[in-house]
Image (spheres, coloured by chain):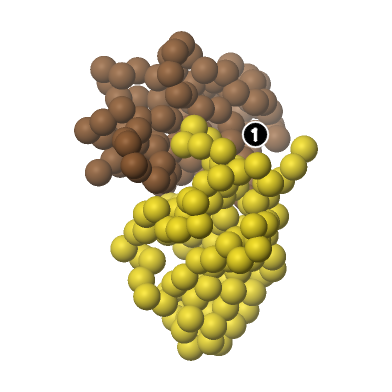
Chain colours: A brown, B yellow
Amino acid sequence: AQSVTQLDSQVPVFEEAPVELRCNYSSSVSVYLFWYVQYPNQGLQLLLKYLSGSTLVKGINGFEAEFNKSQTSFHLRKPSVHISDTAEYFCAVSEIEEGGSEKLVFGKGTKLTVNP
Amino acid sequence: EPEVTQTPSHQVTQMGQEVILRCVPISNHLYFYWYRQILGQKVEFLVSFYNNEISEKSEIFDDQFSVERPDGSNFTLKIRSTKLEDSAMYFCAGGQGPYEQYFGPGTRLTVT
């Protein structure tokens, strides 16, 4: 069964600083990878996804992530954060298997706090 | 841009009561899901639904839970006899395929 580890539960950064949120996964088959963002009192919004092809994927709000198969990682990065990026970020995987339901398995989340 | 909607936004119920959580997925979606997030914990998969039947369910999704897509637009989650531990945020999600799932804003269920 697949699992997702987000190593940092909280990441405080200053405005305009770069940030990296780490995600590692475990699976015995190929996977799709996703990052979702949850703003306070809101639902989950898809930031970006890796399905195939280029290992560097770009998403909304200036975020990008790189799939590293050998390290089973999918870290999320942004070169310069804004106050409005303060939110909780969830990494998720979906195993690619015939007849599967493509359910998402989520990590515990990383709370990003951007300080002025 | 079409969105997944969920009603109600907040539901308070007494232990042992039945609740129905409603979702209206995006019209061209074929796969539907329910997830829940207990306060402070990770988002957990409950059930997936495709072609008018359950395709997979988790251990959490026991006999107290059921799902239905009664009229081709709504997608409902029913909990027959709620327990205190069912208190959580319940998210509906949908997608055209396995490559992405769009989530609704959630229903906060509080069982007292």
Please provide percent x and percent y for residue A57: 52, 17
Q: Nearer the viewer, residue B22 or A76?
A: B22
| x 42%, y 58%: residue | B54
Left or right of A29? Residue B8 is right
Quarter of the image for residue B69 reads bottom right
- Residue A80 visible, this orientation: yes
Numbered disc total: 1
Q: Report the residue that reaches farthest toward the top.
A: A54
| x 47%, y 70%: residue | B66
Mark 1 lies on residue = A85
- Residue A113 visible, this orientation: no
Quarter of the image for residue A98 reads top left
Q: Nearer the viewer, residue B67 or A27?
A: B67
- Above/below status of B107 relative to B5: below
Q: Nearer the viewer, residue A8 or B54?
A: B54
| x 61%, y 43%: residue | B29
Which quadrant would the C terminus of chain A be assigned to in this image? top right
| x 35%, y 43%: residue | A100
Regarding mark 1 in the picture, which secondary structure is present there?
Answer: helix
- Above/below status of A99 relative to A24: below
Please provide percent x and percent y for residue B104: 64, 51
